[in-house]
Amino acid sequence: MLTNLSIQNYALIDDVNVQFAEGFTTITGETGAGKSILLGGLSLVLGKRADLSSLKNQAQKCIIEAEFDISKYRLEGFFQSHDLDYEHDTILRREILPSGKSRAFVNDSPVTLDILKGLGERLVDVHSQHQTLRLTENDFQLKVVDALAGNQDNLHTYRAHLEAYRKVSKELRELQEFQSNSNKEHDYNSFLLKELEAASLKEGMQEALEVEYEQLNNVEQIMEQLSQGHQLLNDEQLGLLGRLADLKRSFQHLADFGDTYAKLNERVQSIFIEMDDVAGELEVLKDGVEANPERLESINGQLQLLYDLQKKHQVNSVAELLAIKEDLSTKVDAVENIESNILEKEQELQLVAKKADTWAAKITEARNKAIPKLKHTLQENLYALGMPSATFKIEVHPSDSFKSNGKDDLIFLFSANKGSEYGELKKVASGGELSRIMLTIKSLLAQFEQLPTMMFDEIDTGVSGEISNRMGEIMKQMSQTMQVFSITHLPQVASKGSHQFKVFKEESASGTSTRMKRLNEEERVKELAEMLGGKAISDSALAHAKQLLQ
């Protein structure tokens, strides 16, 4: 509930700071005194957009603070999701700077205007003439029916299945769009894939082919060098192996004359063994090397194919071609399997739709059961509010599409007079009738939901006498379970408040300012008497005012 409101430098307000209590609070004052200014200031701290004209003194900033006791509102989740410190006594602050910029804070943490507005909507329901128009909206009408129907749990479960349905629907649409777009590219991708598959690509093949190509392309030079090396090693008179054999034998005789000669002998022996092995390998290579023009031509063709593919795909290696081949294979497979994937997703969609349908049917059933009670309650309460012939025609019609609150369209028609045809509320109900209907509905909702602080802005406009007395009783009854404010011109309503504040203008040398004060018992009698009979207070007006307060 709202416990304190502070407004500085706003419109006609220099500095107002008031404390509020629970229950029913009425706010009165002459026309033009600034009651709407007070409400405007509160709206700013609840997230309404502002402009520079809001400042009384254009050289100073405007500061509005509202303190709330939010311990009963279960708002911990909201604070956690927006990374805000949760406190039972929470302060909302709005600052409008002379530059025109605006800043918003929740418990001294800076927040965006959207966050401030989101929190404000959970704390105060400001009922103005504009808000009365919500009564004509289908979603709001369904909310009223669902409150009486006790559909909260059904709606929670339904929305979970609806979320699953929308998720699967989106996935199905994406598959269908993919199929539509990929069909155009499928043939070309298939051609590219087959071209790469025909190349029999393997990691490292290009390097191996290039080595073999160089060998075959230079076979004569290789044979010449191998033959020359073989001759240098194996010549009978000057061959290196023969000379090393003589050296080996010489050093064998030295090996017995100490470690130094033995080690030297071992090194010579190793050199001989290594060179003998080289000679053997040269023999094998020399005998194995031969010209192969057919193989050379084949390798040249394979390399040219690789170079052409790399140029075509704008890459520089077989590894990159393999990656492209894998990607093309995935795309081609996806298109070739898309029909079965779409069929599978359609079957999944049918299952989740069936579950959502089941819960939507439960919601519809509960609504149909609640409608007679709703019609009776509305008509009974409106009878007491001076609308004895008011009747409603409320029907639930099934819809083909899933909505956030079920699969129903609600027909909510109204007739104010006997014999009049039913019509939509916004077309056949007057402003005063809409206000009374909305008050009745709000009082009804208060019995089933934990509503925030309710602020009624002249909801009693256009009524008087016993009807205004009854409207005051309804608001007073609502205040037993929630905090209720009413800005009113009617003494019958003002007298029902547990607390009464007066808004008034005060003139001084520096200008005109709007003030607000809480009235004591004596001041309330005087204020009500003025509301009844004007500034010249008569004894009868005083007596009537006292009677109203009693």
Image (cartoon, rainbow, N blue to C red):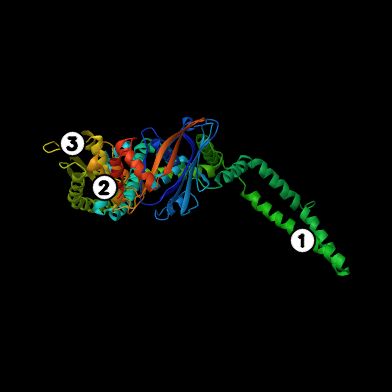
**367 to the left or right of 163:** left
- Point out the frontmost of discs 3 and 1: 3
Which callout, 3 or 2, points at the residue further toward the start of the chain?
2
> In the figure, residue 124 lies in which quadrant?
top left
- Counting residues from the start of the chain, the first of labels 3 and 1 encountered is 1
Q: Earlier in the sequence, mark 1 or mark 2?
A: 2
Q: Which residue carries the number 2 mark?
A: 144
The foreground one among 88 and 341 is: 88
Q: Could you tell me which secondary element the residue under label 1 belongs to?
A: helix
- The image position of residue 439, as x and y in percent, is 27, 44
Residue that numbered label 1 is attached to: 270
Q: Residue at x 42, y 55 (%)?
A: 71
Q: What amino acid type is highlighted by mark number 2?
A: Val
Helix, strand or loop at mark 3: strand
Q: Disc 3 marks which amino acid? A: Gly
State yes or no: discs 3 and 2 in contact (Cβ < 8 Å). no
Residue at label 3?
423
**Residue positioned 46% across, 41% down in the render:** 196
Q: Secondary structure at mark 2?
A: helix
